[in-house]
Every structure is written in structure tokens, then in C-alpha cells.
Amino acid sequence: MLDPLNDSYYLASAGDYRPDEPLIADIKADICIIGGGFTGLSAAVACAEARLDVVLLEAEHIGFAASGRNGGQMIPGFNMAAMDLIKLVGEDVGQQLYHLAMSARDRVHARIERHGIDCDLQHGHIHLAAKKSDFAYLEDEVAFSDRLLGRGEAVLVAPTDIDQYVNVAGYHGGIYVPKGGHLHPLKYARGLKRAAKSAGARIFEGSRAVSIREGEKVLIRTISGSVTASNVFLACDTETGDLATKAGRYTMPVLNYIIATEPLREDRARALIPSNAAVSDSRFVLNYFRLSADNRLLFAGGEKYTPKPPEDIAAFVQPYMLKLFPQLADARIHYAWGGMVGITVNRLPHIGRAGNTLFAHGYSGQGVLLTTLVGELLAELLKGDSRNFDLFEKIPHRGFPGGKLLRSPTYVVGMLYSAMMDRL
Ligand SMILES: Cc1cc2nc3c(=O)[nH]c(=O)nc-3n(C[C@H](O)[C@H](O)[C@H](O)COP(=O)(O)OP(=O)(O)OC[C@H]3O[C@@H](n4cnc5c(N)ncnc54)[C@H](O)[C@@H]3O)c2cc1C
């Protein structure tokens, strides 16, 4: 049966796919990676390239969850301004983390090039200020970027210049990052899978890990097999808590929805986003959008904090699109889908280790680039250099209050409050 949350433009446009066979044996590995999204796949590529014996278990198929459904926006950095990061962790650690996060975009570009991944890559990301005070904040961010990375990495866009990048009204300026961009996430995920396999990783799909027994060696069981490994890496984002309750407390799944219009005529599409950049805004419940390779507008917006998706996702998201682009009133919506975003309280990813169990989750809507960084840092760690991976353990995290069932209502209250402040 078609999953109503996964009737995505990506599945329809990524080409035919044959998943790999499930695990039906008891096998051994240096590292067992659980999850075949960007985090798990990029870890598999990096570890296999570092000559480790890698097994990856994916419950469904590669790119099944957020990694195959997201906006494809390549947004450099964390979901927290660098200045705030430094306030949180101090100048030294903050600068190191900032440089690492900013290195993620080059790492993704390098991967795409090295492995010849055809994923509709486009350059440029613009973040728009929804309020005047947000623009003042962006000015500070650009000054900060100039100081740490050099001029030109982030460009301040005056309110009167927005239309050179995107034709929307009602914003107060923005920040343009030439090295941001967008890609087709499912094609990227499948490309990473090919790269991992050609480097020697063994990948099993339809293979849900159901239990982990810790010890000198870790024993991971699926319904029909097992992996005994020196280390296990939990790369299951919003489902981390099913295997590791302690780490799972630090993320909360939030449903987010995207629609894709019918293909627009080239000139009509360009008139919407002349720069062809990925676009997002500074609202708490943000709008984000971009063009696809075949000139559809892919648009995400709106807020709904119940665990149940709307009956009609297209009808739910379309009004937000028409508010910004009323000229699209006649454009038919061809696809509408959704997925779970794993968020943390402070919006920074929760990455760390306990013994030989390692985990990374909660990228808070900015995982397209950061996941590749994390995969590479994991390989570094397993080869004996833990400096970069362990920097993430210096980020103070708070768990969401309550167990799995209680976390959600508490969070809903917080989100509704922030969304209300947005409107004010
Ligand atoms: C609608 C939406 C839009 C988004 N837009 C953007 C965007 O534009 N830009 C951006 O940077 N980020 C965006 N994000 C966030 C980004 O997609 C995620 O941060 C990123 O994909 C997380 O990758 P991951 O590999 O850690 O997790 P996932 O992609 O969720 O992968 C986890 C995998 O683990 C598997 N799994 C879970 N449990 C088990 C188990 N027990 N055994 C085996 N396998 C298991 C799942 O099936 C899944 O395939 C968006 C997310 C969503 C949902």
C-alpha cells in the first residue's frame, strides 16, 4: 500500500531501485551501522574507505525516512547562529565546531564529485529575514563569517536586492551563501550507497535491528540474523530511542510536509527564483522552497503539532505557498508528502558515545550537510583520532521532559507558543 506520507516527488523521479537482500545469517564486522539515511550511509562510505569492515542494517530501504524525503536544502552551519554557539560552548570549542560545520559543504561537494553522484546539484542558499530585528541579526552573522572565514562566504542581501535572488514580498533582507545549494536527496542517498558498496561495505535492507547487547563486542540482532561487531553506530535519528532509551530522550520527532507543483515553464520558474537558490526564512515555523531539476516548485510550510498528519497534505501546505506566490494559484500540485524531523532542545545535533555504542541524531532540520561530516568524523574516531568527534560531546544538551509519550504534549505547548510569537 502507498504510504500517504511518502508519495514524494523524489520517489517518482529517482529511477528504478532494487533494494539489497535482508540479513539472514550471523556475521561479524568492525562496525555495525544501524540506519541507511545520510548519517549511516556517509559513515559507511568513510569507514569502508578507511579499510574497516562495515555492515549497515536498514529497516526499510535506503533513504526511506528523512534522508529520502527532505527539502534537499544544503544549509551550511548549524541551526544556531555561530555567535550563540560560542556563547554556549565558549570561544575555543565554538570556533572549532563552527569550522567543522562549515567544512560539511565542501565534504558533500567532494563526495558528489569523487563518486560521480548525479543528484541535480545546484549552488546557492538564501535565508530571508521575516522581521526587521532578524535582519539586524543576519548583519552580525555576516560580520562574524567575514572575520572567521573571509569575505564572500556569506553575503548580506539588502531588502531592495531580494528580488535578484527570489521574487517574494514581505521580507526584510537576507543572507546569501554561494556555497549552499540544493540537491535531490534520494538520488544522493542512493549514490552514497553505491559508493559505500564499492568501497566494500555490506548493506542489508529490510533488516530492522531489534536489540543490542553491549559488551566487549556488541551483538546486534535482527529478526533473521545478527551482527557481532567491535562498535555499533546508531544512525536512526528519530528512532534512536527504540534501541537506546537514554540517547533517545534528547530528540523529539516533528512531522513536516512538502508539496511539489506540476513542472512550470522555464521562464515562469525562473521568474519565481531567478538565482535558482534554495530559499528559507527566519520564521519559527519556517517556509522553505526551491525549484527541482524539472522546474517544479518544491515548497514546505505550515505548522501542525499533532502526531497525526493532515488528511490532505497538499490542501494543508498549498495556502502557505500561495501566500508567497499568489501567481501559482493555477499550478496543480502533483506530489505531497511528509517526514519526521529529529530536533533537539537547543537545535544542535546530539552526537556522542557510551563505550562502544556511538550515536548521532537530532540535526534539527539541517542534516543534509552535517550528516556527511558526522560520518567522516566517525571514521576518524575509529581510526584512532577522536578529537573532532569528541568536540560534539562538549555541547550541553537537555533531554525532553518525560518519556516517549509525555515528551510530545510538553513540546506541543512550546511550539504553539513560539508559532504565536512568530505571528505577533
Ligand atoms: C520533511 C523534511 C524536510 C527536511 N528538509 C531539510 C532540508 O531541506 N535541509 C536539511 O539540511 N535537512 C532537512 N531535513 C532534515 C534531514 O533530512 C535529516 O536531518 C537527515 O536526513 C537525517 O539523516 P539520518 O540518516 O540521520 O536519519 P534518517 O534519514 O531518518 O535515517 C534513519 C534510517 O534509520 C532506519 N532505522 C531506524 N530504526 C532502525 C532500526 N532499528 N534498524 C535498522 N534501521 C533503522 C530508518 O528506516 C531510516 O532509513 C528535513 C527533514 C524532513 C523530514
Image: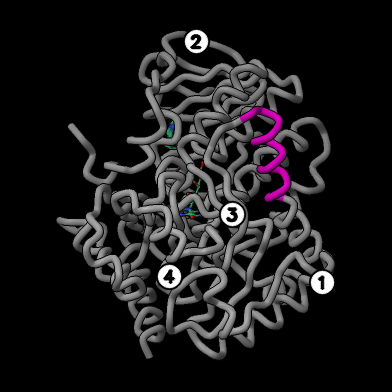
Mark 3 or mark 2, earlier in chain: 2
Q: Looking at the image, is mark 2 or mark 1 earlier in the sequence?
A: 2
In this rendered view, identify the residue nearer to me: 61 or 11: 11
Q: CA distance from mark 3 to mark 1?
A: 28 Å
Q: Amino acid at mark 2?
A: Asp
Say what amino acid the circle numbered 4 marks.
Leu
4 vs 2, front mark: 4
The residue under label 4 is: 286
**Quadrant where the N terminus is found in the figure:** top left
- State which tag comes first along the sequence, 4 or 1: 1
What is the crowding at mark 3: few (fewer than 14 residues within 10 Å), some, or many (at least 20)? many
Q: Position of residue 344 (x, y in %)?
A: 51, 61
What is the C-alpha distance between the residues marked 4 and 2? 46 Å
Residue type of the residue flagged with mark 1: Glu
Residue 399: x percent and y percent?
A: 50, 62
The tag earlier along the polypeptide, 4 or 2, is 2
The residue under the point 83% across, 39% down is 385
Residue 295 appears in the picture as rendered? yes
Q: Which residue is mark 1?
A: 91
Residues drawn in magenta: 104-116
Query: Image check: 86 left or right of 372?
Result: right
Tag 1 or tag 3, which sits nearer the N-term? 1
Q: What residue occupies the far left of the structure in this picture?
A: 311
